[in-house]
Amino acid sequence: MANIQDKARVVIIGGGVIGCSVAYHLTKLGWKDVVLLERKELTSGTTWHAAGLIAQLRATANMTRLAKYSQELYGTLEDETGVATGFKRVGAITVALTEDRKEELFRQAAMARAFGVEIEEISPAEVGERYPHVNLDGVTAGVYLPKDGQGDPGNIALSLA
Protein backbone atom coordinates (compact mmCIF):
# COMPACT_ATOMS: atom_id res chain seq x y z
CA MET A 1 0.00 0.00 0.00
CA ALA A 2 1.18 3.54 -0.77
CA ASN A 3 2.64 5.66 1.99
CA ILE A 4 -0.21 8.06 2.78
CA GLN A 5 0.48 11.14 4.86
CA ASP A 6 -1.75 11.77 7.86
CA LYS A 7 -2.13 15.56 7.56
CA ALA A 8 -2.21 18.30 4.93
CA ARG A 9 -2.66 22.06 4.77
CA VAL A 10 -5.87 21.54 2.79
CA VAL A 11 -7.89 18.47 1.85
CA ILE A 12 -10.31 18.85 -1.05
CA ILE A 13 -13.18 16.37 -1.21
CA GLY A 14 -14.29 15.65 -4.78
CA GLY A 15 -12.26 15.26 -7.96
CA GLY A 16 -14.60 16.96 -10.38
CA VAL A 17 -14.04 20.21 -12.19
CA ILE A 18 -14.62 22.28 -9.02
CA GLY A 19 -12.33 20.24 -6.77
CA CYS A 20 -9.61 20.11 -9.42
CA SER A 21 -10.00 23.86 -9.98
CA VAL A 22 -9.55 24.57 -6.27
CA ALA A 23 -6.41 22.40 -6.20
CA TYR A 24 -5.10 24.04 -9.40
CA HIS A 25 -5.57 27.57 -8.06
CA LEU A 26 -4.09 26.82 -4.63
CA THR A 27 -0.98 25.28 -6.18
CA LYS A 28 -0.70 28.27 -8.55
CA LEU A 29 -0.60 30.41 -5.37
CA GLY A 30 2.33 28.29 -4.17
CA TRP A 31 0.58 25.95 -1.75
CA LYS A 32 2.55 22.69 -1.54
CA ASP A 33 0.53 20.53 0.84
CA VAL A 34 -2.71 20.06 -1.12
CA VAL A 35 -4.55 16.74 -1.17
CA LEU A 36 -7.53 15.97 -3.39
CA LEU A 37 -9.72 12.97 -2.52
CA GLU A 38 -12.11 11.23 -4.91
CA ARG A 39 -14.00 8.02 -4.14
CA LYS A 40 -13.31 6.40 -7.52
CA GLU A 41 -11.48 8.31 -10.22
CA LEU A 42 -11.33 11.94 -11.23
CA THR A 43 -14.56 13.25 -12.81
CA SER A 44 -16.57 10.15 -11.87
CA GLY A 45 -19.19 12.24 -10.03
CA THR A 46 -21.43 14.84 -11.65
CA THR A 47 -18.70 16.36 -13.85
CA TRP A 48 -18.77 13.48 -16.34
CA HIS A 49 -22.32 14.28 -17.47
CA ALA A 50 -22.20 18.10 -17.39
CA ALA A 51 -23.02 19.89 -20.66
CA GLY A 52 -19.76 21.85 -20.71
CA LEU A 53 -21.30 25.15 -21.76
CA ILE A 54 -19.02 28.06 -20.91
CA ALA A 55 -21.25 31.15 -20.80
CA GLN A 56 -20.26 34.53 -19.37
CA LEU A 57 -23.62 36.28 -19.07
CA ARG A 58 -24.74 36.00 -15.44
CA ALA A 59 -27.21 37.76 -13.16
CA THR A 60 -24.67 39.13 -10.67
CA ALA A 61 -21.38 41.00 -10.94
CA ASN A 62 -19.36 38.33 -9.12
CA MET A 63 -20.77 35.47 -11.19
CA THR A 64 -20.09 37.43 -14.39
CA ARG A 65 -16.47 38.08 -13.39
CA LEU A 66 -16.00 34.42 -12.46
CA ALA A 67 -17.53 33.20 -15.74
CA LYS A 68 -15.32 35.59 -17.73
CA TYR A 69 -12.25 34.35 -15.86
CA SER A 70 -13.23 30.70 -16.49
CA GLN A 71 -13.64 31.33 -20.21
CA GLU A 72 -10.20 32.94 -20.34
CA LEU A 73 -8.59 30.14 -18.29
CA TYR A 74 -10.12 27.35 -20.37
CA GLY A 75 -8.88 29.08 -23.51
CA THR A 76 -5.25 28.79 -22.34
CA LEU A 77 -5.30 25.71 -20.09
CA GLU A 78 -4.46 23.18 -22.81
CA ASP A 79 -1.34 25.16 -23.80
CA GLU A 80 -0.28 25.41 -20.15
CA THR A 81 -0.82 21.77 -19.16
CA GLY A 82 -0.63 19.83 -22.41
CA VAL A 83 -3.96 18.13 -21.60
CA ALA A 84 -6.74 18.72 -24.14
CA THR A 85 -9.82 20.45 -22.73
CA GLY A 86 -11.96 20.33 -25.85
CA PHE A 87 -12.73 24.02 -25.31
CA LYS A 88 -13.95 25.81 -28.42
CA ARG A 89 -15.17 29.39 -28.60
CA VAL A 90 -18.28 29.01 -30.74
CA GLY A 91 -20.21 32.03 -29.44
CA ALA A 92 -23.61 32.15 -27.79
CA ILE A 93 -26.88 33.94 -28.35
CA THR A 94 -29.51 34.55 -25.69
CA VAL A 95 -32.89 35.80 -26.87
CA ALA A 96 -35.68 37.70 -25.17
CA LEU A 97 -39.35 36.93 -25.82
CA THR A 98 -40.80 39.85 -23.88
CA GLU A 99 -39.95 43.51 -23.42
CA ASP A 100 -39.22 42.86 -19.73
CA ARG A 101 -36.75 40.11 -20.62
CA LYS A 102 -35.16 42.36 -23.27
CA GLU A 103 -34.63 45.06 -20.63
CA GLU A 104 -33.14 42.48 -18.24
CA LEU A 105 -30.81 41.09 -20.92
CA PHE A 106 -29.61 44.53 -21.94
CA ARG A 107 -29.00 45.46 -18.28
CA GLN A 108 -26.97 42.27 -17.81
CA ALA A 109 -25.08 43.06 -21.03
CA ALA A 110 -24.16 46.52 -19.74
CA MET A 111 -22.89 45.04 -16.48
CA ALA A 112 -20.92 42.34 -18.31
CA ARG A 113 -19.39 44.94 -20.63
CA ALA A 114 -18.23 46.90 -17.57
CA PHE A 115 -16.15 43.84 -16.62
CA GLY A 116 -14.64 43.48 -20.07
CA VAL A 117 -16.96 40.80 -21.44
CA GLU A 118 -17.30 41.07 -25.21
CA ILE A 119 -21.08 41.26 -25.76
CA GLU A 120 -23.34 42.79 -28.38
CA GLU A 121 -27.04 43.59 -28.29
CA ILE A 122 -28.65 42.31 -31.49
CA SER A 123 -32.01 42.66 -33.20
CA PRO A 124 -34.30 39.72 -34.02
CA ALA A 125 -33.12 39.94 -37.64
CA GLU A 126 -29.49 39.69 -36.50
CA VAL A 127 -30.38 36.70 -34.33
CA GLY A 128 -31.77 35.02 -37.45
CA GLU A 129 -28.69 35.91 -39.51
CA ARG A 130 -26.33 34.40 -36.92
CA TYR A 131 -28.51 31.36 -36.22
CA PRO A 132 -30.84 30.71 -39.16
CA HIS A 133 -32.47 27.66 -37.54
CA VAL A 134 -34.06 29.60 -34.68
CA ASN A 135 -37.79 30.31 -34.64
CA LEU A 136 -38.00 34.11 -34.40
CA ASP A 137 -41.71 34.23 -33.49
CA GLY A 138 -41.98 36.58 -30.53
CA VAL A 139 -38.26 37.34 -30.28
CA THR A 140 -37.83 40.97 -29.20
CA ALA A 141 -34.01 41.11 -29.11
CA GLY A 142 -30.92 39.15 -28.27
CA VAL A 143 -27.36 39.35 -27.06
CA TYR A 144 -24.36 37.73 -28.72
CA LEU A 145 -21.21 36.69 -26.86
CA PRO A 146 -18.52 35.62 -29.36
CA LYS A 147 -16.13 34.19 -26.74
CA ASP A 148 -18.63 31.86 -25.08
CA GLY A 149 -18.07 28.25 -25.91
CA GLN A 150 -18.18 24.62 -25.00
CA GLY A 151 -15.62 22.31 -23.48
CA ASP A 152 -15.35 18.77 -22.25
CA PRO A 153 -15.89 19.03 -18.46
CA GLY A 154 -14.02 15.80 -17.74
CA ASN A 155 -11.01 16.85 -19.76
CA ILE A 156 -11.08 20.34 -18.26
CA ALA A 157 -10.92 18.72 -14.80
CA LEU A 158 -8.07 16.46 -15.89
CA SER A 159 -6.20 19.42 -17.33
CA LEU A 160 -6.67 21.35 -14.07
CA ALA A 161 -5.43 18.31 -12.12
Image (cartoon, helix red, strand yellow):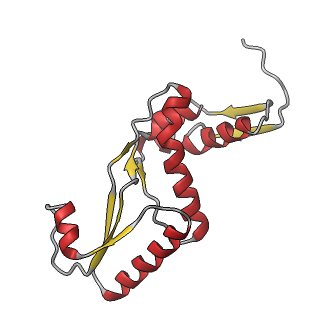
- Establish if 46 lies above or below 129: above
- Establish if 157 lies above or below 146: above
Q: As drawn, is 56 to the left or to the right of 99?
A: right
In the depicted view, which residue is nearer to us: 19 or 100? 100
Counting from the top left corner in percent of width and height, residue 89 is at: 37, 47
Counting from the top left corner in percent of width and height, residue 70 is at: 53, 50
Counting from the top left corner in percent of width and height, residue 126 is at: 21, 69
Q: Which residue is rendered at x = 38% and y = 50% of the image?
A: 149
- Quick one: quadrant of the C terminus? top right
Count of all numbered marks drawn on residues in the image: 0
Q: Residue furthest top?
A: 1
Q: Residue furthest bottom?
A: 99
Q: Which residue is rendered at x = 67% and y = 33% of the image?
A: 37
Corner quadrant of residue 160? top right
Counting from the top left corner in percent of width and height, residue 96 is at: 31, 77
Q: From where the camera sits, is residue 102 visible? A: yes
Corner quadrant of residue 28? top right
Q: From where the camera sits, is residue 41 visible? A: no
Q: Which residue is rendered at x = 22% and y = 78% of the image?
A: 139
Corner quadrant of residue 32? top right
In the depicted view, which residue is nearer to us: 159 or 46? 159
- Quick one: quadrant of the N terminus? top right
Q: Which residue is rendered at x = 68% and y = 41% of the image?
A: 25
- Establish if 136 lies above or below 17: below
Q: As drawn, is 130 to the left or to the right of 87?
A: left
